[in-house]
Amino acid sequence: MNWSEKSAADDTYSPSAIPDYDRDFLDPDDLRQFENALTDQGASPLVALNDWRPIYQRVRKGRGRRKGPRRTKDETREGVLYTVLKWPFLFIVFGWLAVLAFAYTLTRVYIFLYEQWITWRGRRQSLRRQLRAQTNYADWQKAAQALDDHLGNQRWKETDEYAYYDHLTVGNLVRQLKKVRKEAEHEIRDGRSGPGDVPAAEELCTLLEACVKNNFAGVENPRLYSEAYSGTKNLVQKYIDELHACIQVVAESKVISDEEKLQHFKHLDTNFGRTALCLSGGATFAYYHFGLVRALLDNEVLPEIITGTSGGALVAALVATRTDEELKQLLVPALAHQIKACQESFPTWAYRWWRTGARFDTSDWARQCSWFCRGSTTFREAYERTGRILNVSCVPSDPHSPTILANYLTSPNCVIWSAVLASAAVPGILNPVVLMTKKRDGTLAPYSFGHKWKDGSLRTDIPIKALNLHFNVNFTIVSQVNPHINLFFFSSRGTVGRPVTHRKGRGWRGGFLGSAIEQYIKLDLNKWLRVLRHLELLPRPMGQDWSEIWLQKFSGTVTIWPKTIPSDFYHILSDPSPERLARMLRVGQQSAFPKIQFIKNRLKIEIAVVKGLQKFAHAAGGRTAAPAASRWRNSDHHLDDDHELPHPDPLSERLDHNLPERRVEGDGEDAHLLLDGSLSDNSSGESASSRLRVPEHRRGSTGSILEEMRRQSAVFFDDVDMYAAEEDALRSG
């Protein structure tokens, strides 16, 4: 390493390398309003002060003769047999779970030794070490191809037949698409061949609408990327490349009108769906997410929809409030100097825990968290600044209310740092907090009647269903670092970019017997945990049902599990040093490298469809875009010169069609977005060239229920005429 490289490496450890390192984004008035909301007595009838002090319950030491048991509100936990059999049955089941856990540990040790002594030896082991030593994706790909050549995986790529996708359909479709595409290109160059012929571009549109779908013919089956270290079947790669070329030809064709192209790309977008990055919780294990995000960012495959829970919410907030260039400066080891949430001494936090039932101070965490969220930025403001859609899972402190997925659609004016705190409020670590919303004058106020919220990982660590509902997400990239789940992750047939290395990738890890025992024990553990939950035998410390931390879904289409080390458990509630964060960044990046080719192929089609929507969005009325500087929008410089501003993203375009009250009147450059959340006096929404605005829920509005129902139903249905008749009737009336 020469002097310049050494100097650059040293700079990444210096606090001066961090943009806005000394800047305090949080307004003291905002913090004061948050503290007042936490101690507001108006909310006391609804929630407890903390998890260790329930409401409506007085705890006194009994004197004299004990009275009979009082009837509780939980009718299912009563009865003679339930009382007599509960604890014996509970002890028996927990004893059996302990036996299963011990057996599972032995099984995993056997599989580990089997792989080390039988699989990883000789030349194969040296190539594997070279693969793990790479720090950038280009070098990693070369090392992966060398390992594939040695293992004979290249021959598997050249063979079209495979049990996990329809190779005959894909092969025929590739040939047909290629033929029609060449005819369409000939039309573009020389015009139509005859007045009675069907344009090749229209035939190409028909083919694309039939095959541009999520996991069409199994081409997005993760198994197709789990038999080799780099890439997939050559036929699958040809199919992806041909689809991309055909989409571009349709966009360039002059035979089809712009309105027809717009409708065509809307159908493709609805059928293909969207991709989301999901960052799990896991205390300080969540810092591995920084490396994962850096790898995706460097390879230009970072999705625009990002969700985070608990510790992952902090990382997601940093990503969603910063531009690409800012992230490249921030995701360095020097970022550790800004992570100071656990700097207090043992006597300080022990005394606080004894007094309040929480280890950490809520106000101090709000101050620390605000830097990562750029102060009191709201979900809507973050979307407008970066074009990324941030989602944060929050669980209500009472056990009956449903969880929420806060984003710029469901809670546009909610302050991000309050949602991050709520998503990280693990009982005993941080007391439940109040979500804050930004009012029109810029001041903060309690959100949702001052109800308190807690850690999202308790119920929905990975909110796949909610993402599908709000954003049509059907392809999820999950970075999973929860320590209690990480220990049980095991893929018996290999994962994306990490195939089974014996029997030419067609075998089982640890042999069939080892994998079978591992699967049986894990399923049996899951079964007994579900039995305890359904029979309501599990105790509920602090009034919380803890069964979901084991029984919910923790994986996605692509699941990335950064490799942890034992010292991570020791530092689970400690701030990282720059050296430790540098290791976590490197490990996070290396864990993402095997998945990048799969993600690239997915986003290659998705981005092409989104760009097509943006290019022809003016055909629906020539509306300008919101000031959200999306990477995909900025990269599309070949748009018409007549439109200086980029076109709106497809989601906003569809919302504006079905929800006119989102718009602000104005023409051309005179149209403006009301960033403070205020409504225009004449915001009827009839101006076709006004910019995007997010709806403000107005209390007392007679049509608020109808508007909410329409908003929920119109998020992803692209029929622009769905409510046209109703709107005309309202205007005439």
Image (spheres, rainbow, N blue to C red):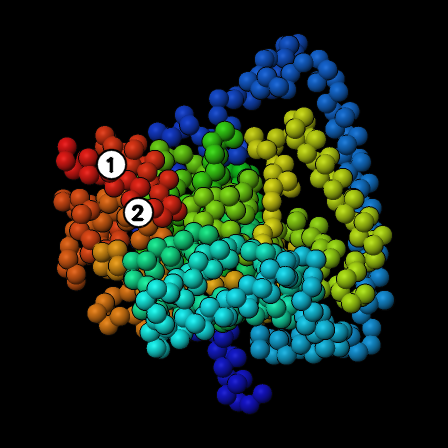
**Is residue 359 placed above or below 504 in the rendered structure?**
above
Q: Say few, some or many: other residues with alpha carbon within 10 Å of mark 2 (under 14 / 14 to 19 / 20 or more).
A: some
Q: Is mark 1 on a helix, strand or loop?
A: helix
| Residue at x-position 34% and y-position 46% | 719
At which x and y percent is residue 480? 60, 54
Q: Is residue 667 left or right of residue 263?
A: left
Q: Is mark 2 on a helix, strand or loop?
A: loop
Q: In the current view of this chain or complex, which residue is farthest to the bottom?
A: 2
Q: In this view, does 347 lie to the left or right of 258?
A: right
At which x and y percent is residue 463? 51, 45
At which x and y percent is residue 350? 57, 45
| Residue at x-position 33% and y-position 74% | 191
| Residue at x-position 66% and y-position 49% | 485
Q: How many marks?
A: 2
Q: Mark 2 points at which residue?
A: 720
Q: Earlier in the sequence, mark 2 or mark 1?
A: 2
| Residue nearest the observer in this picture, 638 or 704 | 638
Quarter of the picture containing the C terminus is top left
Q: Which amino acid does label 2 sit on?
A: Val
| Residue nearest the observer in this picture, 336 or 281 | 281
Q: Mark 1 points at which residue?
A: 726
| Residue at x-position 38% and y-position 54% | 266
